[in-house]
Amino acid sequence: MTIFEKKCLVEVMLYILNATKGTDIYHILKILYFAEQKHLVKWGSRITADDFRAYDYGPVADNLYHAIRNSHRLDHELTNMLQAEVSFAGDDAPNILLANRAANIDFISKSEIECLDESIAENAGLTFNQLKEKSHDNAWSKAYHSESDIMDSISIAEAANATHEMLEYIKEQSIIDKALA
């Protein structure tokens, strides 16, 4: 991920945290996944450049998860960016994150905000088990039971019932992105 992509990811996370008044890591990751899914279906593009991986408890934005958890697979740059902008609620709520400032929406498009708002409205109030069941969709299952646990954009969009035309558009964009990389 580039510095700009990491900055965008941090701003999206701050947006979610401000809209929810702080929430747990699991909800952040699932809200982001469902917003990503919505954006793919409506616009044919991703919100973040982070890879979604199929973990036991559902899809996870991989770099974001490891940066939050400060794990061995972390991206030090992203971790440092997050630590400056996000804090844990405290010892009595160790998985609850709070935003240290408002999100800079210059880094988030109107279409991304629309999808984030829809996902927040639909998912912020769900329980852990409800989110787990909802996120164990066909895209998750396909990646979870394959050699690679990375969830591709086409599968994510298919799981949300994207039209055939939109899936073709996403495929074309994927080919272009790979050629330009």
Image: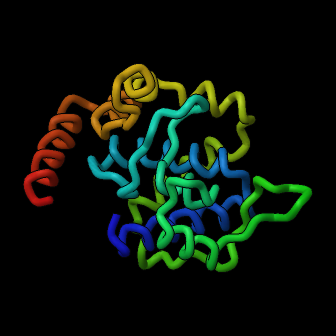
In this rendering, the answer to whether 87 lies above or below 54 is below
| Left or right for 34, reference 157 | right
Q: Position of residue 123 (x, y in %)?
A: 63, 42
Residues 27 and 51: in front is: 51
Residues 85 and 137: in front is: 85
Determine if residue 38 is in view: no
Q: In the rendered view, how is the structure colored?
A: rainbow
Q: Residue at x 77, y 57 (%)?
A: 96
| Left or right for 133, reference 138 | right
Q: Residue at x 91, y 56 (%)?
A: 92
Q: Residue at x 31, y 40 (%)?
A: 153
Q: Position of residue 14 (x, y in %)?
A: 59, 68
In this rendering, the answer to whether 157 lies above or below 102 is above
Q: Position of residue 2 (x, y in %)?
A: 33, 69
Image quarter of the C terminus? bottom left
In this rendering, the answer to whether 111 lies above or below 162 is below
